[in-house]
Image (cartoon, grey):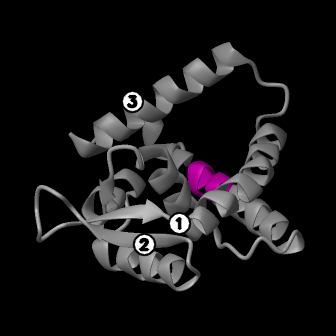
Amino acid sequence: MTPNTSDNRAYFFKIDTTIKKIRQSLQKKLDDLNVDLTVDQWVLLDHIFRHEAHGVSQNELAEMTVKDAPTVTRIIDLLVKKNLAERKMAENDRRKFNITLTDAGRSKFHEAYPIVAEVRRKGWGDLNDEDYKTFVRILDSIYTNITA
């Protein structure tokens, strides 16, 4: 097998370490401001908030967040225990539950969002819209290549 120039590019390591650093930074901010959310709880809270109008199931949340079903169930259980989310039986399928936010969950979303936005702004720094388009195009291409 002939080596390809991409064989020696540690792009996965670079992506992984960057994601870990972002998660650490966000978790520290959430902890410092006593928001009482983990990054994983925030990710689900955010997705539930954004899809609440039409309802979102646990399976859909697992697909959206690329997390396995048991992990999503565990995080939802924690959000329910904190009174931030609730399970409601789907109107069209009694075997399925939609996850919605409680009033406290919506308040928690609005409390945490400015912190998340601040971390995103800090991470993005002085990169511009064209940089973002290029960044997304490259990541989408990698994603497509890996899933094909």
Closer to the observer: label 1 or label 3? 1
Residue at image point 31% right, 68% down: 88
Specify the label residue 32 is tagged with: none
Q: Are marks 2 and 1 in contact (CB under 8 Å)?
A: yes
Separation (CA) of disc 1 from disc 3: 37 Å
Residue 144: percent from left, percent from top:
31, 35
- The range drawn in magenta is 13-19
Residue at the limit of the structure toward the top, as seen here: 130
Q: Name the residue beneath numbered marker 3.
A: 141
Specify the label residue 86 is tagged with: 2
Separation (CA) of disc 2 from disc 3: 36 Å
Residue 122: percent from left, percent from top:
84, 42
126 displayed left or right of 42 = right
Q: Name the residue beneath numbered marker 1.
A: 102
**Can you tell which quarter of the image residue 94 is in?**
bottom left
Tag 3's secondary structure? Answer: helix
Would you say the magenta stretch is mainly helix, strand or loop?
Answer: helix
126 displayed left or right of 55 = right
Residue 19: percent from left, percent from top:
63, 55
Amino acid at the residue labelled 1: Thr
Q: Earlier in the sequence, mark 2 or mark 3?
A: 2
Does 33 sit above or below residue 81? above
